[in-house]
Amino acid sequence: MERLQKFSPFYVMDLVREAQRFDDTVHFEVGQPDLPPSPGVRRALAEAVEEGRFAYTESRGLSKLRERISDHYRHEYGVEVDPERILVTPGTSNAFLVAYLLSLEAGDRVGLADPGYPCYPNFAAMVDATPHYFPVDRESGYRIDPAALVGSGIRALHISSPSNPTGTLYDSASLAALAEACRSEGIRLISDELYHGLVYETQAPTALAFDDEAIVINGFSKYFCMPGLRIGWMVVPESLIRPAEIIAQNLYISAPTLSQYAALEAFDYDYLAQVRDTFRRRRDALYDALDPLLPVDARPQGAFYLWCDISRYSDDAMAFSRELLEAIHVAVTPGIDFGFHGTATKIRFAYTRQIGHMLEGVERLREYLTRR
Ligand SMILES: Cc1ncc(COP(=O)(O)O)c(C=O)c1O
């Protein structure tokens, strides 16, 4: 079937499988936090089980949770968001499909950064839309230039800030300019803000501050440390509330109920500050150790990834990643998982493990690359 040809695999999963063969692997390939969610979340989850919260909820999610998410926008960004515009979703992953179904017809083009998060083109394939790649690199700060949108013919633009795989950010000025270009070109802006909160020196702006017509997607998998609870949310413009609800009713009925009760307690800002601090310390430690060996190509302002240049050693990221795993049991993600532009000479390191574990990996790299 033609559609199936359009889905691309996640190459790192092959490496993850191979990494199981060794019990001393140093893991830089894992893109999820190793920290638990706040104590309140764990308590609320246990209580929800005790109280027998096993039924579906309303498709848009518990109204208490939507109100809490709305409070979060006021608290974090000073932006008012009507809870009616919020839908709770099973992870951001399902929200992407809802957003594409709301924004794209078959044959439409969706603008994506290259490199970027690899699932987006696969979601495009699901709705018979076509990715239109905007190459981004060190020179452009890994940001899409608003001028590139003019005449591009795309129906929607899907960004992530901070980005996976580079950790780079759209600051207020660049996000405002992009939103303005989308507005004047009639392009729907879809903003993946899943790594908000994990931004270390500044604060990430939300697209909602610049564009009421944007679809904004966020979730509990990274900053809130709840990836396995499969819960996220989206904010849609007023005109799309009812269509989004109808899609949600059909696609997943409602997000997991136990997870929704747990998420009510996720906005514990003292705990979240500790999470952020832990990742900031890890970023600094890994950056300082790794940069002299494999230069970090983009100064990462957020998320938990370093995007490193391997061109000193190889122009085949997949072969190089395999070699590191076989030779020194260090698991990384090959750049080619994230697109085409400059990705054959990049690998991604996730700093989602303790500093001691990561420094052990860097030591193995130093020793191996020196004698290679
Ligand atoms: C940029 C980005 N968006 C979305 C996701 C999906 O997350 P989830 O479905 O757990 O919310 C990921 C996961 O790694 C990601 O890196």
Image: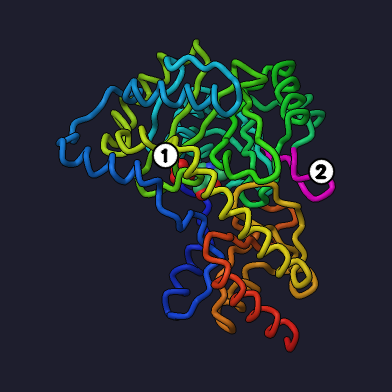
Relative to 322, is 140 above or below? above
Q: Quadrant of residue 89?
A: top left
Residue 52 shown in magenta: no
| Residue indicated by mark 2 | 140
Position of 45 with respect to 284 (left or right) is left
Say few, some or many: other residues with alpha carbon within 10 Å of mark 1 (under 14 / 14 to 19 / 20 or more).
many
Residue at horizontal 28 percent and vertical 28 percent from the top: 253
| Residue indicated by mark 1 | 91
Locate the C terminus by quadrant.
Answer: bottom right
Is residue 119 shown to the viewer in this render?
A: no
- Give, as a three-letter code, the residue at label 1: Gly
The spot of residue 281 in percent (x, y) is: 62, 58
Magenta part of the chain: 132-143
Q: In terms of depth relative to the viewer, which is nearer, 145 or 166?
A: 166
Residue at horizontal 59 percent and vertical 45 percent from the top: 198
Residue 137 shown in magenta: yes
* Residue with the most extreme top position: 239
* Residue with the most extreme bottom position: 371
User: Could you say which disc has been placed on residue 56 in the image?
Assistant: none
Label 1 within 8 A of ligand 1 by Cβ? yes
Q: In terms of depth relative to the viewer, which is nearer, 146 or 28?
A: 28
